[in-house]
């Protein structure tokens, strides 16, 4: 049973590829998506693996917090070959759901869009931390709302024409740099789903033969930079009585260990999947 939790915001600084096993639509390496919404997400298994690696390597780098082997095992569980002897770790990770995705626009260059469904899911997560929910504004299909749309009647996102409405929305801005906050916008669930399905980055890769002929051409999908995800870090009390244990000690320690940039997904050596992490504290005000 988890008794402590933290909300983590993950901002993609560079394009992100957490791959799915299935391919389709001419894409050899698509990103992983929720089956029922087709929205991209970051699997909890990927997040746990990266966090464990960071903590294991903390004693060999300049992290503020150092983890010994016993702490890593207690927090994350034993190595797979020892799992049957030592039980699960105290930390739990939740799939990180997408909150915002950037989309090219005919006005303001691009907007960073969300939708009522994802705001509702985010509000549900905030409620677990006793944080006041954000107001969700009604919106018609084929419409975009933003405070940056004054005197603009219509906007093209990619090649989709939307009716533009200027409105102060007070959208969540956790983890969003100040210079991007004016680009936050609201669209309908259906419009968001279309862009989540069709507006990801596609990059071609090619292996050339000795005669410079194409030997292996494939296409890889990426969630674009400036996308925002939210997830949870959970912690259970010790499975055995331990008078020295402090509730939430490992989730608190992991926050002190977090690096400036967090890498998740494939293509690490080419700089993809770099993320910034912003924790949301229990009861934190969002300035409404």
Image: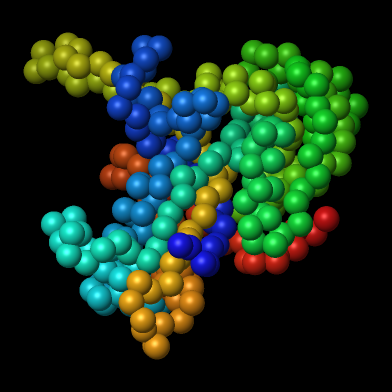
Q: Is residue 260 visible?
A: no
Q: In which quarter of the image is residue 222?
A: top left
Residue at the extreme right: 151
Q: How is the image coloured?
A: rainbow
Name which residue lies at 48% across and 30% down. Answer: 34
Q: In which quarter of the image is residue 116?
A: top right
Name which residue lies at 38% across and 37% down. Answer: 18
Q: How many marks?
A: 0
271 left or right, relative to 281: left
Name which residue lies at 56% across and 39% down. Answer: 98
Name the spot of residue 54 as percent of width and height, x first: 33, 63
Name the spot of residue 138 as percent of width and height, x first: 82, 31
Above or below, 154 relative to 280:
above
Name the spot of residue 93 as percent of width and height, x first: 43, 54
Front residue of this view, candidates 137 and 269: 137
Residue at the extreme bottom: 243
Name the spot of residue 5 as percent of width and height, x first: 53, 63
80 left or right, relative to 254: left
Position of the C terminus by quadrant: bottom right
Q: Can residue 128 be seen in this view?
A: yes
Position of the N terminus by quadrant: bottom left
Name which residue lies at 39% across and 88% down. Answer: 244
Front residue of this view, candidates 269 and 118: 118
Above or below, 63 relative to 220:
below
53 left or right, relative to 272: left
């Amino acid at each position: 049973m988890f008794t402590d939790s933290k909300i983590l915001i993950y901002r993609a600084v560079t394009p992100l590829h957490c791959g799915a096993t299935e391919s389709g639509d001419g894409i050899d390496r698509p990103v992983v998506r929720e089956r029922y919404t087709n929205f991209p997400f970051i699997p909890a298994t990927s997040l746990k693996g990266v966090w464990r690696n960071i903590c294991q390597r903390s004693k060999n780098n300049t992290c503020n917090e150092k983890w010994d082997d016993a702490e890593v095992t207690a927090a994350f569980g034993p190595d797979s070959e020892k799992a049957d002897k030592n039980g699960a770790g105290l930390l739990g990770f939740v799939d990180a759901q997408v909150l915002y995705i950037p989309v090219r626009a005919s006005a303001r260059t691009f907007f960073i869009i969300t939708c009522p469904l994802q705001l509702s899911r985010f509000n549900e997560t905030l409620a677990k931390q006793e944080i006041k929910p954000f107001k969700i504004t009604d919106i018609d299909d084929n419409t975009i709302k933003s405070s940056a749309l004054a005197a603009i009647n219509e906007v093209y996102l990619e090649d989709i024409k939307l009716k533009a409405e200027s409105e102060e929305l007070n959208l969540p801005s956790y983890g969003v740099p100040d210079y991007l906050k004016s680009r936050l916008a609201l669209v309908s669930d259906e419009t968001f789903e279309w862009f989540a399905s069709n507006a990801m980055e596609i990059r071609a890769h090619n292996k050339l033969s000795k005669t410079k002929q194409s030997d292996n051409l494939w296409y890889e999908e990426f969630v674009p930079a400036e996308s925002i995800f939210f997830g949870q870090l959970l912690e259970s009390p010790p499975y055995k009585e331990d008078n020295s244990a402090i509730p939430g000690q490992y989730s608190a320690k992991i926050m002190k260990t977090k690096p400036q940039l967090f890498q998740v997904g494939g293509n690490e050596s080419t700089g993809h999947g770099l993320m910034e992490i912003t924790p949301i504290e229990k009861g934190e005000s969002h300035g409404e």
